[in-house]
Amino acid sequence: MKIAKSFGNTQVLRNIDLDLAPSEVVALLGPSGCGKTTLLRIAAGLLKATSGQMEIAGTRVVDGSGFNAPPERRGIGMVFQDYAIWPHLSVLDNVAFPLRMRRQGRAERERNAMRALDRVGLSHLADRFPGTLSGGQQQRVALARAIVAEPPLVLFDEPLSNLDRELREGLALEMGALLRDLGLSAIYVTHDQSEAFTIADRVAVMLDGEIAQIDTPERLYSFPASVEVAQFLNIGALIDGNVCHTRGFTCSRDKFNLPDLRQFAPEGPARVLIPRTAVRPDPAGTLTAQVMRCQFQGDRYLLHLDLDSDAASLVCPADHPAPIYSQISLAIDPDRLRVFPH
């Protein structure tokens, strides 16, 4: 692949290399301006790559010499932010529209559209109009239209970004289950970490025009490849200091009584990541912190803690509340700590 894209002297994508397995969903996750939408538009044929090659289902669509197959020759499906459903067309006609553009006969395209609607569980709403449907049903109509021609790849351009959080979380669960049931190969662009982790088999974290790390959601969280990935995912507290074989780990203001870090890093400057999953309140714990805020979550509390080390902070789940500004002790799971040598 090795896709690169520049606008004038500004390089937006730097040698992106991404492979999808059959029936795999990969999410492109990153902040605004990281290049994820640009990459999706290049895959769709809506934007030309500056250099690189790309194949979809074994067919070369970008060859590095200026050739760029148009969208209609790529055979892909797309689901947009606002679903792009025509309100004056019935559900059936919306889904059948791509086949109409291919000049497929009316009887055949309606038969294929009904099959696509049946796959997403909406064949009973074929005669309805989009304005009478719920958000989740409209999402399924957009997906049925994207898969009606049985494309080898479906591209999703932040389809849930315009919804409120509660609805988005519910539809993300539904979308993830549906994509797995359909066995689709898909690239899913989002800036929402929870959405990416819910929907995708693998997540590509994009930072500054590059894929900083691509892995399963579980491994991304447990084994971030860099400080930048850990910061973007907000995994926990990052503390600057030094690893010393005799004094343990020291930072600029305090000596932290952390487990022996020699097995994780050589002596010298380092950053230690303390994930929120690595600590728990424990009177016998060896790490102390000050409670800055106690947030009730219904089934648990979240303690927002100050570690008093260069303003390092940490969010820790707890079964019981703690008074604001009180000092608590934390037990540490050393296997969950990550050390990044400078």
Image (cartoon, helix red, strand yellow):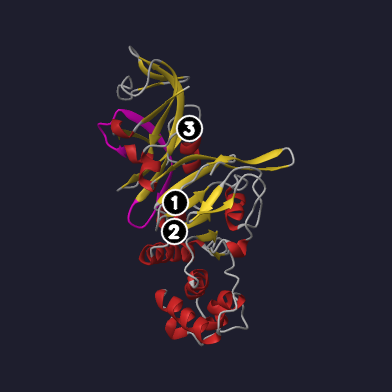
Position of 275 relative to 125 (above/below):
above
For mark 2, what is the residue?
185
User: Is 270 in front, or is 311?
Assistant: 270
Q: Which residues are magenta?
A: 279-300
Amino acid bearing label 1: Leu
The residue under label 3 is 227
Q: In this rendering, which labeled residue sits more in front, label 3 or label 1?
A: 1
Q: CA distance from mark 3 to mark 1?
A: 26 Å
Q: Secondary structure at mark 1?
A: loop
* Residue located at (46% from left, 33% from top): 226
**Left or right of 296 in this view: 31:** right
Query: Helix, strand or loop at disc 2?
Result: loop
**N-terminal of the two: label 3 or label 1?**
1
Nearest the viewer among 97 and 106 is 106
x, y percent for residue 73: 59, 63
Foreground tag (3 vs 2): 2
* 239 sits to left or right of 84: left
Q: Where on the picture, by quarter, is residue 305?
A: top left
Give the left or right position of residue 330, taking residue 176 as reference.
left
- The reply to whether callout 1 and callout 2 are in contact (CB within 8 Å) is yes
Looking at marks 1 and 2 on the same chain, the residue that comes earlier in the sequence is marked by 1
Q: For the residue carrying disc 1, how many other residues have a C-alpha within 10 Å: few (<14), some (14-19), or many (20+)?
A: some
Q: Position of residue 288 (x, y in %)?
A: 36, 30
Task: List x then y, in percent, for residue 106.
Answer: 55, 86
